[in-house]
Amino acid sequence: MELAQSFVEQPLYKRLKPSDWLYAVLVLVAAGQAWRLYNPFMDGYEQAILAGSAIGLVALGWFWKAWRWFFPLSASVALLGISLYHGELARAQTAFWLKFLLSSQSAIMWMCTLFFLATLVYWAGLLTRSAMLSRMGSGLTWAAAVMGGAGLFVRWYESYLIGSDVGHIPVSNLYEVFILFTLITALMYLYYEARFATRQAGAFVLLVISAAVGFILWYSFDRQAHEIQPLIPALQSWWMKIHVPANFVGYGAFAMSAMLGVAELLVLKGVLKDRLPSAEVLDEMMYKAISIGFLFFTIATILGAMWAADAWGGYWSWDPKETWALIVWLNYAAWLHIRLVKGWRGEPLAWWAVIGLLVTTFAFLGVNMYLTGLHSYGGL
Amino acid sequence: MTKNSRNTAVYKLYELFSSMRFAIGLLTILAIASIIGTVLKQNEPYPNYAFEFGQYWFAVFEQLGLYDVYHSGWFLTILAFLVLSTSLCILRNGPGFIKDMKAYREKASDNSLAAIKHSVELPADKVDPDTLRAYLRGQGWRWREHQREDGSLVLAAKKGAASKLGYFFAHIALVVICIGGLMDGNLPLKLAEMVGSVVPETRDIPQSQIPSQSRLSTANLSFRGNVTIAEGKSGDVVFLNAGNGYLVQELPFTVSLKKFYVDYYSNGMPKLFASDIVVTDKASGKVTEAQVKVNHPLIVDGVAIYQASFGDGGSPLSLKAWNLEAPQMQPVDIKGISMGSQPLRANGKDYNLEFGELRVFNIENMSGKTDDAAGKSLSQRMQDAREVKHEKQLKNIGPSISFKLRDKQGQAVEFHHYMAPIQQDGVSYMVAGVRSKVSEPFQYLRLPLDDKLSLDRFMRLRSAFMNPALYDEIAQRTTAKAMQGSAISPAMQQQFAGSVKWILARFAQGGFVALEQFLDEKVPQDKRQAVAQTYVKILQGAVVDVMNVADAKAGLPPVAMDSQHYRFLLDSLVGISALHDYQAPVLLQLQGFDQVQASGLQLTRSPGKNLVYLGSLMLVIGIILMFYVREVRLWLRCGTASVRLAMSSNRHNRDLDEDFRRRSEAIQQLVRGK
């Protein structure tokens, strides 16, 4: 009987360590401080979003232990940057640390550099079978994510320095969401990397992130897209704070699943077979990514529909963006049915996941580039 | 079911419709069909399609309903089949799933337990069912027991039965969402159009004259239409897009627009669109006053009112008309209303004056620097990439009006005039644009303004140019000036005066172009440049005298000939010359306006919305339950010297392998009785 007691599953709160509680207190104090400072400027929905984010961040930290140091670190880097501004945007060009590291654009350029380096190092690790290099790849990806997170936070602050009526969360145009995309994809990959104890797939997932980074650089240097623009009336809504991030969890997960699909296809063809994880592991990671992506994409599409009901006069207008979101959704719904009900595995589903990325990319970018509609918030 | 009934055609159809391959097929067809509507722009005016595809394909595509794919019969049929297929799938699998959710399968035989993939026979020293029960309880399992006749005891446990519940949530959700969507779709309306009880109106006629067959009563369950209301006006209908025409939807209330607001950021991007509206119920007289903004609709009696667009609601304008063909005439004040048209009679000819939009703000980038990155140095680019804010010289250059002047033959020329003086290099101009084809950009001309920022002096100068009776005096003054400066000899005096008069006449007749034309036709090529320079010199000298004569004739003192005023005269020469391309008998100068804006409102009634939201919530709950609640079953068959542990899950994945390994170790420890 006593022995059986030792197998009793403890409730969650008993399994938490002091460090978990410390993290929770830290997040709640930070949220309380944000509340104290900005409460008068937020409407009820935004206050609810702040409270919900605090709870969500605590839950995420308890669920994924690495988040407990990542988030506070990234936020601290951002706060350090913000403290150097003294309320003047022009200091971004004069103060040393802002100019070379902590202003949003500098931080984002560091993120870009670190992602490129991580890609190279992951590939070197994969090809030379060096566990040390692969570990470095992880480290560089983490560092890139820290800088990317900090860059977005600082950008949020900078937007208010331009004008109190200009300020907004940096998820409002194609440039900003591309940063969000690289950040979310990288973090999701890092989670699964630890969960499945395999670093070799990083070489593939980082390829899609590097492609996005290449786009960010082109968009910034050639098109000056990094300039902070105020929000047009249609985007002035608290819905943006939840709709966009939810969508990018979906896009990030689908992008990751496609790259895992590529890796699986190579393994099945015998290429890099002895260097990459087994096809079963990659298959399982791909399924996990698609199921989380599908959940968030569903939520994001529903949130988008509810926003459309507030902004465009109807929850569904068959706008190109809405229609393509439906197509993406149908695609992955079919994928999941085939896998779960028919029990398919391996090559066909891996191909399907790769093709799924093309569909997703068109919904994300192609609609903005080639089709006209209400959802034209980021042209090229 | 009996074997017989399984072979009937109805059953086979049922089996097909409820099958997964049919559902997957439908999903694929739906996805492909949806693409059509995103590639081909929907609900455009029909002539656009006819122009794009040609008459034959236009008719074919119209028959296929491609101009409104998502409301076409065949698309709705696919959706209906999806609802049917999902419903049948639930009916087919539901009972089994419910049974499965309730069952513990405690009566499983030894053979079937051994056949499970994750199954192991553990040797036991002492099998104490209480220890195993405590283990299961501690881990949160629910279980049932079965005492077999052979004396062994089976503990059948399970966890995560809610996973199956997820199936019901997610699939019923789809049916709920589709029903909600069909409620809000215009299905009943389409049926009414098909039987002919509702006929879309295609003519552009006043709302009150639209016949009842094109009007929908307030009883209409759901609609989505638009109406434009000017400030101070009201509306009690909305217009619904219906194929090639439109329908009029009666509203249960009247919407009046008190005021429309538009606000811009300093960079010219729009910041706020808002309408102050008053909604008065027709039956009860209840009044609701509110401001609707983008993202903040007003909901009255289940009808949501949205800020959709805005425009000019017909603003009273006052204009000064300068008769260009009779320059001696004083300007005339005329009144007009933007977005309206009125007759205009000038110099014995009739025209129709059609006003376009009055734009009060025109924000332009005055820095003149293009954002072209090609010519930038690397360090400049690095610098740019670091800054999130770039300085731009944006300026509001004030109100503008566009209008068309249509002659009796129906030929129209379009104009775009700015009201406020526009400063360029420290000089003020009136800027007017003209074009004769809509496809062309406006050609802008700049008319210099005098010290009082009016066109008076320019028009006086032009009038003198156009008046040959003054040429003698002008030529005399110019010649005298030339003599004084010893530019010409006394012998040439007569000839020089003649040249001045000739140049004045030629310029008055066709501007610089007329002089150039003469040079091209009559002067040998090698001498053209020298002669042209002489002409320009004479003109630049004479223009001072033209001005002085004009002022003297009007009884005004001569202007001091400083550089600023001389510049005015040179600009005037350009202006007079350019007015030859102006293609209108009158120049209309906007003097003032009383802005009346119009707000475009969208009104919708969508009773299915809450159903769709309910379905969406169920869908999310369903997906979470299906993917993140793992259904696991566990059996412990307690024999005398061994315990069999078997585990199964609805997902065959690594989690189960790991779980099984951990549990078999634990059970092994428990039954060894250490």
Image (spheres, grey):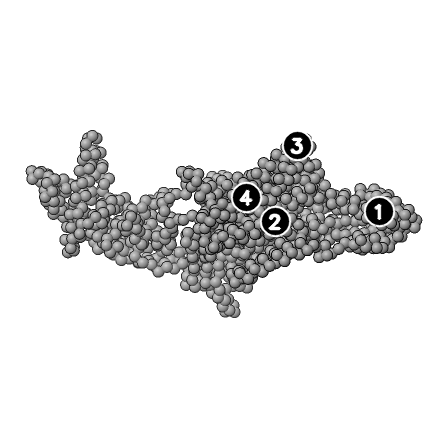
> Mark 4 vs mark 3: which is more N-terminal?
4
Q: Which residue is mark 2?
A: A70
Residue type at mark 1 is: Gln
Q: Which residue is mark 4?
A: A111
Task: Please give the chain letter of the residue carrying mark 3.
Answer: A
Q: Are marks 4 and 3 on the same chain?
A: yes
Residue visible at 79% across and 52% down? A7
Q: Which residue is mark 1?
A: B668
The label nearer to you, 3 versus 1, is 1
Q: Are marks 2 and 1 on the same chain?
A: no
Q: Which residue is mark 3?
A: A272
In the picture shown, does residue B348 fall above or below B382? below
* Residues marked 1 and 4 touching at CB (< 8 Å): no
Could you say where residue B382 lies in the image, as x and y percent from the top left? Answer: 45, 42
Could you say where residue B600 lies in the image, as x and y percent from the top left? Answer: 46, 56
- B634 or A304: which is nearer to us? B634
Q: Residues within 10 Å of mark 4 (few under 14, many from 20)?
A: many
Task: Please give the chain letter of the residue carrying mark 4.
Answer: A
